Image: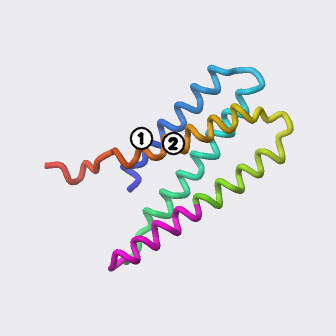
Amino acid sequence: MWRRFRPVIGIQVLLTLVGALLVGGQTAPSVLMGGAVGTAGAVVFVAMASRKTQATSATEVLIGALLAEGAKLLVIALLLWLAVSSYPELVLTGFVGAFIMSILIFSLALFIGDTKTLP
């Protein structure tokens, strides 16, 4: 599973850095934090979803995916709260924009095929 998500997480990091460089100044740390929140959530999801489990039914696989999604949402909520409450110079437009960008990029993983199944 890491093979499928590794390029997407790399794109998240790259675009966050490019965005921070483009805006510069006081907005750059806010963009970095927004992108980091989304990327951290993605990493937590992949780590939990790729755990080796003995799932023998579709129900068990679905429960594992839902637990991974729940952990991702919890990490994102905690990091959003931490960033907003602890950084008074936060530029909300840059922060929220980078966060939304990183979340949308994570959905690209659905369109990346598994190279293991190719002949």
Report x, y in % for residue 47. Answer: 50, 59
The main secondary structure of the magenta stretch is: helix
- Residue drawn at x 59%, y 46% is 38
Q: Earlier in the sequence, mark 2 or mark 1?
A: 1
Q: Is residue 5 above or below residue 27?
A: below
Residue 70: percent from left, percent from top: 57, 65
Vertical arrangement, residue 102 with respect to residue 52, above or below: above
Residue at position x 53%, y 51% in the image: 42
Q: Are marks 2 and 1 in contact (CB under 8 Å)?
A: no
- Disc 2/disc 1 C-alpha distance (Å): 14 Å
Name the kind of residue labelled 2 in the image: Leu
Q: Mark 2 or mark 1, which is nearer to you?
A: 2
Q: Amino acid at mark 1?
A: Pro
Q: Which residue is mark 2?
A: 104
Q: Quadrant of the N terminus?
A: bottom left
Q: 44 above or below 37?
A: below
* Residue 53: mark in rendering: none
Alpha-carbon neighbours of circle 1 within 10 Å: few (<14), some, or many (≥20)?
some
- Number of marks present in the image shown: 2
Name the side, left or right, on which 101 lies relative to 60. right
Q: Is residue 90 magenta?
A: no
Magenta segment:
55-71
- The residue drawn where x is 70% and y is 51% is 79
> Residue 106 appears at what percent x and percent y?
48, 45
Residue at 57% across / 45% down in the picture? Answer: 39
Picture disc at residue 7? 1
Tell me if mark 2 has few (under 14), some (14-19) or many (20+) residues whose alpha carbon lies within 10 angstroms of its own: few
* 13 left or right, relative to 97: left
Q: Position of residue 64 (x, y in %)?
A: 46, 70
